Amino acid sequence: MSCRSRGRVLACPILFVLLIALLTSPLVAEGPGYAADPEPIQLKAMRLSDEASAPTLDGKVIDEAWLTVDPYAAFIQTDPLEGAPASERTEVRVLYDRATLYIGVICFDSEPGKIVVSQSRRDADLTETDAIIMVLDTFNDNQNAFVFGTNPLGIEYDGQVSGEGQTSGISANQSGTSGSQRGTLGSLNLNWDGDWRVKSAITERGWEAEIAIPLKTLRYPTGVNRTWGFNIKRYIRRKNEQVYLSPVLRGSDVYRVSSAAKLTGLDLPPRRDVKLTPYALGAVNKDYTVATDQVVRKVNPFRDRNVGLDVKWGVRPNLTADFTVNTDFAQVEADEEQVNLTRFDLFFPEKRPFFLENASIFQFGAPQQIDLFFSRRIGLSATGSSGLPIDIIGGARLSGKVGGYNIGMLNMQTDTAFDERSGSLLTAANNFGVFRVQREVGRSNFGAIFVNREGTGGTAGRDNYNRAYGLDTAVQVTTNSKLFAFVARTDSPAARGGADHSERVFYNFANNLWQVSGGYSQVGDNFNPEVGYLPRRGYRRPEFRAFFQPQPKRWPWIRRISPHVSYNAYYGMDDNLIQTSMGHFHFFEIQPKQGGRFGTFAERYQDRPVANFPVFNAGGKRVVIPPGLYTWHQIANEYLSDPSAVVSTTVRWRHGGFYDGDFDAYETTFSWRAGSRFLGTLGYTRQNIELRYGDFHTDLVPVKLSYAFTTLASVQALVQYNNQSSLVSSNIRLALLTRSGTGLFLVYNDRRDTTDFNPYETLGRSFIVKYTRLFDF
């Protein structure tokens, strides 16, 4: 039987996924990590008699309130010696009163002078510094949790995790927790900013942290003697050691909520929760745009007042309503430039705070492949890779948990936008609506979504709408494996009469030695989620990925060896011909004891463009690749040094083919830390391409600078040069924060055209002052 014969393309990949599930099930694969999780560790929260007896937050766990609590101290290693006791003692205590949860942690250290502190800015990456990260599963559902973290300087690091950190098979620990992932769609949302306080200090015992989290910052069911899931991960960075309050498998992370300990004895009364966050904005803009020749003309006079308001109302302790009026995102950091040598649009992540809180509830599909809802479609035009801003008049959102259901409802209204130069309509006013529901059953869930875009106002015309709806599930097959699946369909007047559906099945398995996944998806020719992200349509796609990561004992300088392989391919929906494929073969990848990695890998590519497409069009040069089937190979070497060091570097070299020509690429980054306050990174990527149709090169130079005056006051600069767009862009942000990510922001943006090697030809610049303040009732 041929899997590529018509009518059988769907069956064979699904059988392949089921074969992976069988091979990784406990019936076949025996060994460490396959047994069911043990009984959870129990901790008891001690209730304070009154708020006056609460500890004083000074970073030292010495108050009388702390001394009345027996600490929990039996932390266990996951790395480097899985299952061994932690090399340094850690103590944790939990207190609470009617309004606040208090957590005291003492990170004992036999050599306090060697504690690594490399970050001092709110929400900075905690993986390369001594730090703690904790999860609070306030619904005790073994799937979802609030995330809080800090380091010896007392920075605030927070987020939300859903589905145990897995979305369509990609776990949070695989995707990383660094700032580079911030704004991407997934189950780990590091953009949530809660209202809480923390103080840390380095002492003669090591370093200590006192954390106070107002209960109204959290969402939970009320009642007497409630139980929450609770876990803490500690990084002992100079030893590259990770220890846990409640152990998790090495292939997982603290976000595996089902492995958390149980925090008992919580008496949680009803409470009132209303938060108002108004803003005021002043801006000076000058636009000399010649690249797009488009400037959005505002038609809503209220926008010129430069004021707005966000309201958060805790309808119930487990349900939150958000409202926004005259929304503005002037303080949001700029997009990072990317080089695009493909036929498809690039993905630029969402970074606007209103859309990112509880974003995982609205997640549906395969992230960055088939997304039914992508909030970046709201308030940004489709012009260019990043889009032009479109005024958001207002909106509302309701999200949270009702019984065993996660629910999310969103409604946003955008304004009409015209091209100021030509007077032509850029986009009509639109109303965007989303309804999402999930039913949780143990560690599995079943859900549905409905997404609607409808043109409003006199410029919208008739039948100006697009709708998408679907069903999905994530089934916990075994302790360490999960099966994801969805079916979806779209409906719009312009796309009737064709295949307007999409389906996907995906299986993921991970333990302390293997990470294996495989899946199959297909997208119809007329499937068109206009409020989602879909770079291509009309295909069938099998995919496979396998990681083998043993820890050798003979070579103490090696932490882990990680050879791995992955493959995916796109076949035409109608003709079953290969459209695109990519095979990645990492022959070896070695992770040294102190961090970083080095290795060698090869990749095989195929692509079948059906029409001429310009692979390069800049600086007066245009290179076009004609239709046909192309196959080429590349080999690469890479080296990444210890990222926690004062000076770190990345070097990557690629050589091989590109369509029917030759390809050479060199990529390097150089990072320097000056104490815990300054971090600078200089990058350079050069790609040299020689084709029969013309030679060209691409240059991408990002420069990132960050200086933290305090844990809540910092300045960041991003300067980028990209010869594909012939632009030098600058974004400088000064943030003076107060509570929950609010405060004073000063932002300067600058764009300069380099087409004629004249960096002084300014396309536009702006200076923005924005002040936001949180009022809590």
Image (spheres, helix red, strand yellow):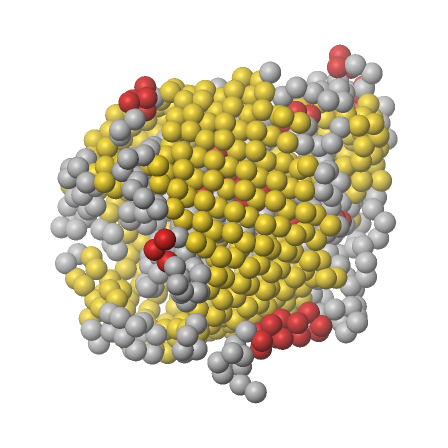
Residue 234: image x %, image y %?
Answer: 69, 43
**363 to 9, vertically: above or below:** above
Does any portion of residue 609 appear in the rendered image? yes
Name which residue lies at 61% across and 40% down. 407
Residue at 52% from the left image edge and 66% from the top image edge: 521
Quadrant including the C terminus: top right
Quarter location, residue 218: top right
Figure quadrant of the N terminus:
bottom right
Answer above or below: position of 186 versus 63. Answer: below
507 or 489, which is in the foreground?
489
Can residue 164 be seen in the rendering of this structure? no
Residue 127 or 532: which is nearer the viewer?
532
Q: Is residue 267 left or right of residue 563?
A: right
Q: Position of residue 109 (x, y in %)?
A: 72, 39
**What residue sits 28% from the left and 60% below the top?**
698
Give the quarter of the image for residue 479.
bottom right
Expressed as whole percent of the image width and height from the top left, the position of residue 25 reads: 74, 69
Looking at the image, the residue that sits furthest to the top is 52
